[in-house]
Structure formats: structure tokens, C-alpha cells
Amino acid sequence: MNQETLKEHDVLVIGGGAAALSAAITAREQGASVLLLECSPKHFRGGNSRHTRNMRLAHETQFAPYTGAYPEKEMWENYMKATGGEGNLELAQMAVSGSASILDWMRAHGVKFQPALAGTLHLGRTNAWFLGGGKGMVNSLFRSAERLGVNVRYEAEVVGLDVRDGHFYSASVLMGGQTVTIPARAVVVAAGGFQSNLAWLRQVWGPAADNFLIRGAPFDTGTLLKILLDHGAESVGEPTQAHMVPIDARSPKFDGGIVTRLDCVTLGIVVNKNGERYYDEGEDFWPMRYAIWGRLVAQQPDQISYVFIDSKTLDRFMPSVFPPVKGNTIAEVAEQFNLPVDKVNATLDEYNRAVQPGNFDHTIQDDCKTAGLTPPKTHWALRIDQPPFYGYPLRPGLTFTYFSVKIDQRAAVLMKGGKPASNIFAAGEIMSGNILPKGYIGGFGLVIGNVFGRTAGSEAAAIARTLRKAA
Amino acid sequence: MQKELLAQGEQLMRICNSCRYCEGFCAVWRAMEYRREFPAGDLNYLANLCHDCSECYYACQYAPPHEWDINPPLTFAKIRTRSYEQYAWPRALASAFRANGMVVALVAALACVLFQFAVVVVHGVAALSTPVPGGNFYQVTSHGALVTAFGLTGLFSAVALGVGLVRFCRDIGEKLSDLFSPSNLAVTLRESLQLEYLDGGGWGCSYPGEESSPARRWFHHLTFYGFLLCFASTTVAAMYDYVFGWPAPYGYGSLPVILGILGGLGLLVGPAGLLVLKRGRNRDITDEGQVGMDTAFLVLLLLASATGLLLLLLRESSAMGTLLVVHLGIVMGLFLSMPYGKFVHGIYRFAAIAKFALERKRKQVLGA
């Protein structure tokens, strides 16, 4: 590739996930010439979008692929409950109302949908599911973008931006072993959070971060987030806030994705490395409590925990990617984890004695609970007494971070002092902290990505038009 | 090798079963979700249920170069080929096929052609170069020799295929009477004859490349229905002969000839299309060890229809004798190679689809 063709682009899009693609496609459809730089190899393109499977979209009536209506009002209430209303509510409102148009937009760009997967039927009403998951969606959007004439480059890592007085001039890009300067009239930064930057995580979390597993994409190192902040962009959110869930401790360090999750916490008991329980495993339904347990495990010594179940409940949750550790007694399982066996036995005995009779029903918050136990288990408390026994080791699994650059309603990056950058826009996880100060509702990240990706793409194309005319 | 492959299959299913993103694509994924353990018989069942469309490969976040190296179409293809060998009777013939399918199939066909020549030579070599008025091929080869040769090869193939089917059903733990009960057969026929699971959930399959396309399904339809029409043509002709006492050859407007022409055209276009698609297939998903066997089957089908149509066209010329001998030889070679080559995929896939239909019904009964 020669410098000449690179110079002609109106809009530079940095990133390769759903937000970047939404921006690139929108800008191209409005007549801009667009160059999209994805830092990963083609096989791993798409960032965290590769790991997704559905989007939470408001729809006032029932139609395929949904199983029922999900009014905007209800989605708004879900959002407020999950985040405590601490986000930027104007931007959140944009995302929630904008979500209604996403299904058609996606379909028009080749994305295929299907009914909710068996086993996740509770999300069939609120969320639209990609046929074959997020990678299929990413593949379709890339195909659509390239057909429209978006210029796509892989293994192109942006290492610097020339930004002066809130105006972007060019990007320094490492590609093919060379650093290339790529100018553009406007830039959309959709390069994700910093979940796979271990040094940055350590800075934020201390040594505990060394025990986190990064289930998200390994290419989200937050380079662009850092560059923008260094150039005087305003930040929003806490660096410790993230989508963090309990996953199998045997998972790979990076990129384990969906399969690493363990759904059995509500069915058993969880102990830390000292063999002690520390939180009510039956507090709420699993999808609701999923995110909380990631942080709970992160707060335990050595950031590790162990969940124990017995053969009664082994088949009551999604199969695990790694086989459970098995033993004829709890001690046999605990031994394999190098846990203090006597303590684990005592914890289990204490728990089993506290379990009250009840009618077990995993689909409702049933009346199976403990009495006189601290911490209690308030639902789905069954005695763990039927061999063989099983255990899984748990670690915090980081999907993406919320710490972000602040943006306005045009998706323009706000510089310190509150003035928007003239031609720098942001979309996706790099700005998710504006809307998600904490908490999460499933399928909302892609909504933010698409709504603000399209906004950013459109605004960037408009600025480029103006600049081109002025030149 | 076998053990390693099964371990690989079990690992694949364990990872896939904890993900399930592919559920919307085809029957394999829903069948997988009915189970938590994947012993050899179940892997063979799932591998034979797989139509090798590759939709799941392109959608997979764990596909190579991810460290988990998830490649369902390739893993299933390897397990499937092994299973063909496991069920084949006699097994040694299947091993030869797997090792070198292309050569073995062509040698078999050639041997059959030579055999037919020998029959003709015994009958009188002049028939090979003399035009026969009306194209009566019994002037070239005797009626009795034809019936005996094809009766024996046909019987042999049928027995071998039958043994394979019984072995497959035993391996996947089903009774023939359950699989092919009238109600289950109806569902199975519908899903097989439409190739319901070869369309990527409604958009066509990722074959030969990443983009969804209905091409493979249509070429397969042409091949399958072409084969069926040719089979029907022969059956009708046999009935004409034995039931009504009308001996061949038949006119262009007769039922056997019309069926034969239509079938022959299907068997020209279908296999040719499938061969072209196969050449363009992504090598990362192709089981190279199977390509020879697959290609041999398609080539034999193509040759059988090409020589058959030529024979019809030139049946009154002096080339008729030679063409007849070549055509009969190839058809015989095709029949003989059927139990050991790609043809068996149809039998095992049909039985696998039948099992999937049964499993759904059992699930419903349990749920009710």
C-alpha cells in the first residue's frame, strides 16, 4: 500500500468490532471515503464483538425473532436498575431509544438472526440472537463494509495520534513492520477498553490483577484510550469498573470467551482458599448475580474460590468446558484443590446442618434456605451429601473495562474544559463508561456500540464533507 | 489413531456443548445438546449427522488459530471416514478405499470394463464394430450374461450396504424397527429428501467459501434425484421386460428412456458442479484423506451418465458396441465400489437423521 491512497480518506476508523463497523459503514454510506484499521490479524478480527451472541433491543410489539414485546420503557427501567441511574442519562436514553432501529439496520447489512438458544429462553423476549453468534455478525458486517467500499487493513496498530487543539490530523500506524503516517479529515476511535493490558490492570488493582483471567479479546490494550487521555481528553468512570464474572480457573489467560463461565454457583456452596464461605450463593437468579461474583472472587485472598456441588445438581446447569474435579467425598475433591480439608469438611457440615426442608425449584426464588448460618444461603439451598462430589475452581474473568473518554451526544470526544474535539469521535467500549458507570445488563454493550458507532460515523462524514469543501 | 481421533472429538463436543452458539445452524448442535458425555457411538452418530457445510467453522470464535483449534467440519469428517471403515463389510476392502479411493475405484471400473469386453469377445467380437439396427444391445452382449453379472454385483452391494447399516445402527444404539417405524420414516424422508440440514439455518451453507450459498444443495439435489431417476429407469425397463414381455431397446418417447435422459442430465450437471465446488473448498476444513474417495464417487457417477447418454445418442452407430461395454463396465464398477466409497454417506446420514427425529420425539414425550 502506498501513502498516496491512504491520504485520500475522509474518515479513519480505528477498531474492528461492531462499533467500528457501524461507524465505517454509516460514514461510507454517506459518501465518505473510509479506511478501517483493525490491529488484530484477520482471524481474530472483531474485538469483543467476536464473543457476543445477542443484543438487547426495545420493541413495542412481538415479532420474530422475539418471543414477546419489550417496550422502551421497560428497557429503560432495566437500565436504571442495573446502573443505579449514575450514568449520563441523555446518552443512555439515546442508546435505549436507538436500540429499536438496530435489528433492521443489522439485517440490511447482512446480519442473520435466530430465536434464543435453548437454555437461555428467558432472554428470548428482550434480546435478538445472532445466527451462529457474534463472529457471524462481525463477518457479515465486514463483508457489507467491504462491498460498500470501506478500505480495511488488518494487523494495523495505531501507536500515536497527531492531535493539536482538539483537532485530529493524522495517525501513526505500525503496519508491515513500518510506522506509517495516515492522515484523515476525521477519526472515529472504536478500539475497545483496556482489559488485556496487564500492566494497566496491575496499576489499577495492584498485584491482585495478576490472578485475573482475561476472557475478552487479547488485542484490547487500551492504547487509544491512553493516547486520547494524554492528548487532553476528559475521562469518565472508574478504572476498576468492568464486566467481571466468575470463570473456570483453568481457562486460558486470554480470549476464553463464553464457554469459560460456570453457572453452578447458585446450586452449591463457594469457599475461598481457606475453606470458608463468604457470600450468599442463593441471593438472586444467576444472570442477575453473575457479574457480582466476579468481583467477589476478586476480593478473596489470592483471587480464587471453589464451588462444590454433588451429583444431585451436576446436570442442572450448562455443561462446563473443563470437566469438574470429582471425588467420592468432599475431602477427596478439596484435596485435589490443595484446600485445608478439615476446614472444608467443617464448612460443609455446618452448611448441611443449616439447610431447611423446602421445595426446590431453580426457575423461581424457591423456599430452600438455610437457618442460623452466616452468611446464609437464601434460595436453592440443598444439602450437599450425594456422592460423587464435584468441584470447580473459580477466578475473576474480565470481559471489558468501562473506564472511558467522555463524549457528547454527537459522539464527539470531550476535551478537558468541556470543549468537544472538532473531528474526533468515539464509539463502543472506549466510551461505554459514559453510560455504564457500573453494573451491566446482558446485550447492552453492542447497543451502545451500534448507536454511537452510527452517530460517530455520520458526524465524522459530515465534518469531512465540510473540511473537503473548505480545502 | 482411532483413539486419538475419538479423544479429539470428545474434546470438541465438550467445548461446543458449553458454548452452543451454533444451535441455529443444523441438527448436529441440537443433538449435541441432548447429551453431556460423548462415547464413540455418539460421536459416530453426530459425525454422520453432519452434512459438512462449514457454517459453524466460520462462525466459531475458537476456530484456529485460536489455541483450542475448534474445527467441527474437519474433525467430524475424519471421524465419519473412520466410521465408514468400521461398518464396512468386508472391512479390508474399505481400508483399501480409504487409503487410495481414487485409484481403487478407477481400477475397479477398468476391471469391470475389461470383464464386459471379455463377455462380449466370447459372444462374438464382430459386434463391437458393426452397427446394430434399432440399437439392440443384446446383439452385443447376451441378455443372460447381463442379468447374471449385474444381479450378482447388485446383490453383493446390497448385502454389503445392509451389513453396514445394521452395524451403524448397533453402534449408535438404535433398533432398525424404531428408526424406520412408519411415523419416524415419514419425518426422516422429509428431512433427507429436502436436505433440510444443508442450508445453514435457511440462508444456504458456507460452501465452498465463506459466503452462504445454496449451490451445494442444488447440485446435490441434481445428483441424488438424477441417480434416483436412472434407478427408476432401470427398474421400469426391467418391469417392461419381465412383466410385460417388452424387450429393450425402447424408443425415445418411452418411459425408461425419458427417465434415463432426465436422470442422466442430473448426473452430469450435479456431480460436475459438486466437483467444481470441491476444488474451491477451503483447505483448512477439508479432510485431505477423504478427497480421493469423494472424487472417485463423483467421477464414476459422471462417467456412468456421460457414457450412458452417449450410448443412447449413438446406439445405431458402429460405436454402440464399444460404448455399451464401457458403460456397463463403469456402472458395474460403481455398484461394486458403492459399499466402500462415498455412497455410504447417504445410508448413514439417513439413519442418523432418523435417530435425530427419534430423539426429538423422546424429548417431547419426556417434556410433556
Image: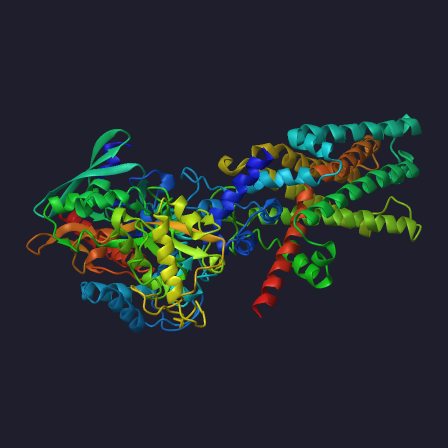
Figure disc tally: 0
The structure residue drawn at horizontal position 68% and vertical position 57%, both measured from the top left corner, is: B189
Residue A9, above or below A240: above
Q: Quadrant of residue A173?
A: top left
> Camera-side residue: B79 or B213?
B79
x and y percentages locating residue A383 in the rendered image: 43, 63
Q: Image check: B189 left or right of B311?
A: left
Asked whether residue A12 appears in the rendered view, the answer is: no
Q: How is the image coloured?
A: rainbow
Identify the image quadrant of the N terminus of chain A. top left
Asked whether residue B314 appears in the rendered view, the answer is: yes
x and y percentages locating residue B346 in the rendered image: 67, 47
Q: Residue furthest left?
A: A417
> Camera-side residue: A224 or A298?
A298
The structure residue drawn at horizontal position 38% and vertical position 44%, both measured from the top left corner, is: A250
Q: Image check: B333 left or right of A445?
A: right
Q: Image check: A387 left or right of B176?
A: left
> Camera-side residue: B298 or B289?
B289
The structure residue drawn at horizontal position 92% and vertical position 27%, both measured from the top left corner, is: B122
Identify the image quadrant of the C terminus of chain A. top left
x and y percentages locating residue A153 in the rendered image: 31, 39
Q: Image check: B56 left or right of B98?
A: left
Residue B214, above or below B209: below
